[in-house]
C-alpha cells in the first residue's frame, strides 16, 4: 500500500449555522478546507456538483469520507462516485470522530461563519481572509495546509519572509511526512505528465473495479 498524498483521502461535512447550510470539503492529510454554502438544505444533486467542482480543482481522491447526511447516501451521489472511481465511506452514527481528520477544518469554518459572518453572508473579504489564514496556519507537524498541498505558503496580506513562498517546502514536507517521499513525488509528477487525460484514468480504474479480482 502506497503512502498517502495530499487530496487522495478527503472528508465532507454538512452543517447548519444560522441561515446557512455549509459544506466543508477537507483533505485528510493536510486539513486543506474548501467551503460551499446554501441558504436552504441542499439537495443531493447540489452537494454532488460542489464535490465534483472540488475534484476538478484539487484532483480526484481515492477515498471520500462523509458524515451521515442523506445527500451522501442518495443514489445519484453514490452512482457518481462509482463513475469517478472513488471509494465512499461514512462516519458511524455512534462514533462521528472517525471522520475526525476534517474536524479542525469544520471547527475553524464554523467559527468564521459565526464570528465573521453572523448575517449569513460568506461572500465577504473578512471571511475569505480568515479562510486564507487558516490555510496558511501551520499544523502540529510545523507545516500549513497550503505547504502540504502546494509546496509553499499562499501569498497573503499578513507579512511573511519571501522564503515562505519557496517551493523547497515541498521537499521539506515530503521528508517529514513520507519516508523516501521525494522520489515518490517525482514519480507522481511524471505520472501527471502522462499524455493520457484524467477521464481515461478514471474510466480505467472503474473498469478494473467492475471486473473484480
Image (tube, rainbow, N blue to C red):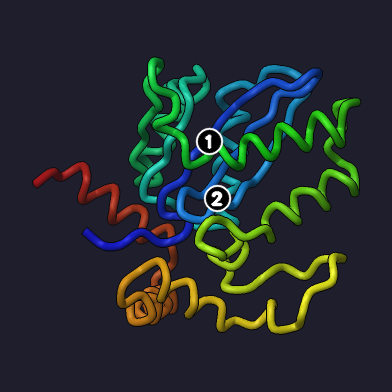
Residue at image mark 2: 31
Q: Position of residue 10 (x, y in %)?
A: 46, 45
Q: Position of residue 105 (x, y in %)?
A: 61, 42
- In-image side of 58 versus 96 (left or right): right
Mark 2 or 1: in front is: 2
- Seen at 42% across and 36% down, the residue is 65
**Dot label at residue 12:** 1
- In-image side of 77 versus 179 (left or right): right
Q: Position of residue 19 (x, y in %)?
A: 81, 19
Q: Is residue 132 above or below residue 114?
A: below
Choose top left, top right, bottom left or bottom right for residue 82: top left
- In-image side of 79 versus 126 (left or right): left
- Seen at 49% across and 77% down, the residue is 172
Of 188 and 151, the residue lying toward us:
151
- Seen at 68% across and 17% down, the residue is 41
Q: Secondary structure at mark 1?
A: strand
Sequence order check: which comes first, mark 2 or mark 1? 1
Amino acid at each position: 500500500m502506497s503512502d498517502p498524498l495530499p487530496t487522495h483521502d478527503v472528508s465532507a461535512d454538512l452543517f447548519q449555522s444560522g441561515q446557512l447550510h455549509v459544506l466543508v470539503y477537507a483533505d485528510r492529510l493536510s486539513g486543506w478546507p474548501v467551503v460551499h454554502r446554501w441558504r436552504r438544505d441542499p439537495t443531493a444533486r447540489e452537494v454532488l456538483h460542489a464535490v465534483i467542482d472540488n475534484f476538478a480543482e484539487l484532483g480526484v481522491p481515492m477515498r471520500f469520507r462523509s458524515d451521515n447526511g442523506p445527500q451522501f447516501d442518495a443514489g445519484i451521489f453514490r452512482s457518481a462516485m462509482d463513475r469517478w472511481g472513488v471509494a465512499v465511506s461514512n462516519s458511524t452514527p455512534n462514533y462521528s470522530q472517525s471522520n475526525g481528520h476534517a474536524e479542525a477544518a469544520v471547527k475553524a469554518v464554523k467559527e468564521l461563519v459565526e464570528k465573521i459572518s453572523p448575517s449569513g453572508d460568506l461572500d465577504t473579504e473578512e471571511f475569505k481572509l480568515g479562510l486564507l489564514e487558516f490555510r496558511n496556519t501551520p499544523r502540529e507537524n510545523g507545516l500549513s495546509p497550503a505547504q502540504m498541498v502546494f509546496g509553499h505558503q499562499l501569498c497573503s496580506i499578513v507579512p511573511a519572509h519571501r522564503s515562505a513562498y519557496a517551493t523547497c517546502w515541498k521537499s521539506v514536507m515530503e521528508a517529514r511526512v513520507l519516508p523516501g517521499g521525494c522520489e515518490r513525488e517525482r514519480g507522481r509528477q511524471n505520472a501527471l505528465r502522462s499524455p493520457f487525460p484524467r477521464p481515461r484514468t478514471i474510466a480505467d480504474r472503474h473498469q478494473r473495479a467492475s471486473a473484480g479480482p
